[in-house]
Amino acid sequence: MAENPPQSQLSTDETQLRTAQLNITKLKTTENETFQPEANSTQANGSKTSDLLTPIAIACRPTAGPAPSSADGTGQDDDDPEVARKLAALKSTVIPDDWLPLPLDPNTTNPVTRAYRYRGMVLLRVHMLCGLQHWAQFRGRPSDVIVASFPKSGTTWLQEIVWRVVHRETGAQSGGGRTLEYRFPLLDLPASARMAMTPLHEMESPRLIKTHLMYHLLPESVHTSGAKVLYVSRDPRDVCVSYYHFQRMVDYERYRGTFAEFRDKFVRGEVMNGPYREHVRGYREQADHVLCLTYEELHEDRVGAVRRVAEFLDKPLTQEEAEAIARHTEFENMKKNPGCNFKHWEQTRMVKTTDEGTFMRKGQVGDWRNYFTEEENDAFMKWVNEPIQ
């Protein structure tokens, strides 16, 4: 058997992979982490535990293939050994040493979405089980284009613009009818086999990739490969409002707190993918090689934003092409486009049809005024403008 190379000869990605494997192997038991319901136990609201776990199990499945069927219509195949293994891992009582559990939030009713702080970023148990090795194994390519953001900052908007610029698509529809998950997969977790998604390493170039990871958690090969990174940010007050409605809508979060409670959690840096200010700063500090755009720019001068994206990606457009892309990426037009409006999430039970609205809710600048009093706004903006320690 060949000897392992010295640590000094390993690439950063290989080192991260070995560290991830070590952390998953060398675990500690934390008694207050216990969550051990029976696989098919019934909750107070009548839903099965397996229903609660389904979206996370979907994200974790590592092998390609069609979605298995189930007798109860949930898409959960209790006899699938791979799903069973992942579900058992999700309900495990052990965590790696460097994943620090955040206080339990009584307003989050799905217990497997327990949050942890890992290297300064708030992530979920599913990231621990599936994400670490996925990031470490990622190999960037010079032709890669990565759209990064804090959630609800205009990610989908920028993704659709980038897709159209790269592929010079100027018609009403885009991507040949494929939705954004397939055209622009997420770096943060492996491809979902239940959705028959192609793993990143099997995708043809140029790969268009989405991430909510903080800059310092991006795989090293993103930086060394010459991949192009774009980042979109938004007024944090509007982000907070939009994220609140999103977490109440999506099935895997099931947030049931008030906006005031969520706002305070946002400020404490305890929402998924937080803390917000550090997330934004990490990318903006790299503005010499990361194209940083804002949600407000996309509203005010979309043609100009399209041209900036095209120039950054070395994909020159005519004025007519830039105007056509800008027109088809107006919020109302995108909301009608099945390729990017995420209406299919309602059929796959990723979201609940409630008064929280849809995935693409309002697309407004300044909706925060309907949620903040003057005093609350003053306090929030004081926090926004405080120096980051």
Image: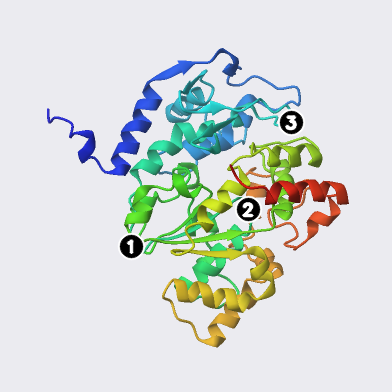
The residue positioned 59% from the left and 51% from the top of the image is: 150
Q: What element carries label 2?
A: helix
**Residue drawn at 75 percent across, 42 percent down:** 263
Q: Is residue 242 left or right of residue 134?
A: right
In which quarter of the view is residue 137 placed? top left
Q: Mark 2 points at which residue?
A: 344
Q: Nearer the viewer, mark 3 or mark 2?
A: 3
* Amino acid on which the number 2 mark rests in the picture: His
Residue 261 lies in quadrant: top right
Q: Residue at x 71, y 37 (%)?
A: 265
- Kindly report which numbered mark, 2 or 1, lies closer to the viewer in this rendering: 1
Q: Residues under labels 2 and 1: Cα distance? A: 32 Å
Q: Position of residue 193 (x, y in %)?
A: 45, 43
Q: Which residue is drawn at 59% across and 81% down?
A: 324
Q: Can residue 63 be seen in this view?
A: no
Give the alpha-carbon distance from disc 3 to disc 2, as whole Å. 26 Å
Q: Which SS class for mark 3?
A: loop
In this rendering, the answer to whether 301 lies above or below 221 is: below
Three-letter amino acid code of the residue under disc 3: Asn
Q: Mark 1 points at which residue?
A: 142
Whether pointer 1 and pointer 3 mark residues with C-beta atoms closer than 8 Å, the reply is no
- Asked if 212 appears above or below 133 in the picture, the reply is below
Residue labelled with disc 3? 107
Q: Position of residue 305 (x, y in %)?
A: 58, 73
Image quadrant for the N terminus?
A: top left
Give the residue type at disc 1: Pro
| Label 1 residue SS | loop
| Percent x, y of residue 68 | 50, 38
